[in-house]
Image (tube, rainbow, N blue to C red):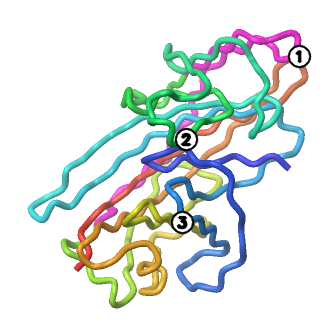
Amino acid sequence: MKKLRLILPVLLLTMFGCHKDTNTNNTQTQVTNHTPNGGAAVTIPSGAAGAFYAINTINYNNNGSGYDTTDIGLGYAWFGNYTTTQNAGSVYVTGDSLYTNNPNLGGLVTFPWYETDITNQFTFSGNSVTWNVQGNSANSIPAINYTDNTAFPVVTGLTLPYPVSIASSVTVHFTVTGAYDAIFYAISGAGGQQTSFTGTNGATSATFTSAQLSAVTSSGSELSITIMPVKLTPYTVSGKTYYFVKQGAYSVTTIVQ
């Protein structure tokens, strides 16, 4: 089955494996990948012809005297197959051209699908996101011109103290405004290590154990916790169904003592 991959605030995600987890922090599935590219996924119908992702990423960095805020917009798309996308011709999101093989990551990651340059740091203004696809008759991909007006799910109230101790569990509280189909949590720390969790819809808090936190960070390093609600909208053109994804990735970062 095809999977809609989530984007975390730092890097676009690559492939990973899943295993069941028995933690009690309102989660059902834990996904572990100790690389800069760990993440979580939600399954969509196997008949999907492709997907388009618009992601608003916001990081609140607790510097000890307040929060520094960084906003970045990310977008990408795939056609036919997530890992080996078909060529769909030119692809644009809100007028910004997407492409394969991002040259601005220093060779760290090469993506096999159309995607935006994360160093541009553009942001989506409002909920209206316009997608334009040239199409490719050789791959039976139609021209697509679609404006996704679905509201971005928004996370508020996410905070962490400065500093934070990982000698015991850490709980974050938050509120999600707007409709969403799934929610994910991620914790990350030193060296790009990361663990992600599938959260329970409707939850307003998430608790991470000392063992889970210690697996990704250590004293004197940073800890980031990310809350990611996702909303999917199907759209059928020329008999093929594509999914338009609105995702929020809200992170809070602090220092570990």
Classify 10 Å Cα crowding around label 2: few (below 14), some (14-19), many (20 and above): some
Q: Which residue is drawn at 59% across and 51% down?
A: 180
Residue corresponding to mark 2:
109
Residue corresponding to mark 1:
140
Percent coordinates x, y for residue 49 in the rendering: 83, 31
Mark 1 or 2, nearer chain start: 2
Number of numbered discs on residues = 3
Q: Which of 132 and 17 is in front in this view?
A: 17
- Magenta part of the chain: 130-159
User: Does residue 175 appear to the left or right of 31 in the view shown?
Assistant: left
- How far is mark 1 from mark 2, CA to CA? 29 Å
Which of pointers 1 and 2 indicates the residue nearer the eye?
2
Which of pointers 3 and 1 indicates the residue nearer the eye?
3
Give SS at disc 2: loop
Percent coordinates x, y for residue 64 in the rendering: 12, 65
Q: Which of 211 and 130 is in front in this view?
A: 211
Q: Which amino acid does label 3 sit on?
A: His
Percent coordinates x, y for residue 16 in the rendering: 68, 58
Q: Which residue, as the protein is rendered here, is positioned at the far left?
A: 65
89 is higher (above) or lower (below) than 203:
above
105 is higher (above) or lower (below) than 15:
above
Residue corresponding to mark 3:
34
88 is higher (above) or lower (below) than 184:
above
Give SS at disc 1: loop
Mark 3 or 2, nearer chain start: 3
User: Does residue 52 appear to the left or right of 61 in the view shown?
Assistant: right
Classify 10 Å Cα crowding around label 3: few (below 14), some (14-19), many (20 and above): some
